[in-house]
Amino acid sequence: MTHDIHIIGGGLAGSEAAWQMAEAGYRVRLSEMRGVEGTPAHKTDDLAELVCSNSFRSDDAASNAVGLLHAELRQLNSLIMACADAHRVPAGSALAVDRDGFSAAVTKRVSDHERIELVRERVDGLPQGPAIIATGPLTAAPLAQSILAETGEAELAFFDALAPIVHRDTIDMDVAWFQSRWNKGDGKDYINCPLDKDQYLAFIDALMTGEKTAFKEWEADTPYFDGCMPIEVMAERGVDTLRHGPMKPVGLDDPRTGRWPYAVVQLRQDNALGTLWNIVGFQTKLKHAEQVRIFRTIPGLEKAEFARLGGLHRNTFINSPRLLDGELRLKSAPHIRFAGQITGCEGYIESAAVGLLAARFAAADLGGRTLAPPPVETALGALLGHITGGADAETFQPMNVNFGLFPPIPGRTKKADRKLLYTTRAREKLADWIGAAA
């Protein structure tokens, strides 16, 4: 099939971009390397495979920036959101999905689309015609070198660590209990494992002394992104760091004592059957044998069997504020757009959002139209603005969507009202933008 645009990368951003282009009436060649060459992080050849958490984070569109982004994508016919909604699993106020069902659904819908040709191939050079590069954090070395040659820039990189997944029937529920923090959602969306002070201090000591994955020479100077910090690196920042982070006990009442424990390890459902649960916030670079030994010291996980142990991979992204224009075009080669994590956004849904925007800009170009960027008061516009110029190019680092990227609410407002004001304003601005683009 001849194509109107070439999209490279079948992750969340590339899959979303391909869907948006095809739905706009354009023929798409979608190139995905997996199927002919694997990566250190992926386990399957499915499109949009989730390699870290199975959570798209908060789905609260009234008071949370990522929940607002969910709502905006739903309004714009997002494939990723449609498949996430169809395969969600209980997670309180968060949107979590059955990872296998979700990826299989994306793969089927993309593969079945009459205007999308899915090709399993590794692309090593920059295309000569209209293209969207959405190769994500594990861009193959030859293509990365082609990007560097075109831009003259050195790529930025950081480490991304994977959390382990536990078989539900190996968790001791005589010790652990079901409860969401402050009983949000249905109040029972997490499994909680309590630690007393001595158990917590012993756990911290084990994290600090456990054998870690050795760095390769080329990885030695790579910084971590705070949103996916390995648990042992957090522990190095202070003995109580984890008690104020992923192991905080506030809002969780141990039914055996009626009180908050000294610390808590939480697990969240990872698949629709409820047979797999991931350890929340426990991304790690501990060696596999050490993970089993250390994590089995957690009360309730003494006999835990792991469906997946934690791992480590390197993330790569370009200096987007310097290299891209406001429509995600490469300034030195405007026929090429970038999308997803390679642009320096962070998070599943942020990646899909940038894929959607890149496709809509490209579709407008191919149709001889100009599409104005979404207003900066919207979640989409705030994220796009950060990537393409809102951030300082000299210190650019990956960013999740958050209200700090939005223009402040003018005038004096109560702090308690501010989030609702942000989301109300965003909905009004998005409606105006959609109407103008129609």
Image (cartoon, grey):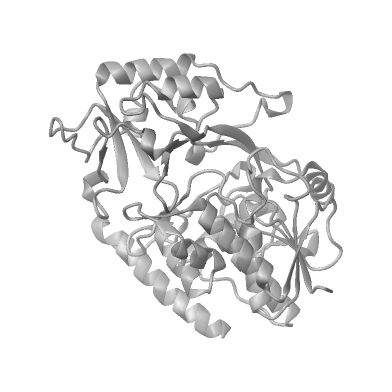
Q: Quadrant for the C terminus, please.
A: bottom right
**Percent x, y for residue 251?**
22, 41
Residue displayed at 72% across by 46% down? 139
Query: Which sits in the foreground, 3 or 38?
Result: 38
Residue lying farthest front? 169
Above or below, 130 relative to 222: below
Quadrant housing residue 335: bottom right
Query: Which sits in the foreground, 262 or 117?
Result: 117
Residue displayed at 48% across by 13% down? 209
Left or right of residue 322: residue 274 = left
Residue displayed at 49% across by 24% down? 291
Q: Quadrant for the N terminus, please.
A: bottom right
Left or right of residue 131: residue 170 = left
Left or right of residue 37: residue 162 = left
Q: How many marks?
A: 0
**Percent x, y for residue 132?**
73, 62
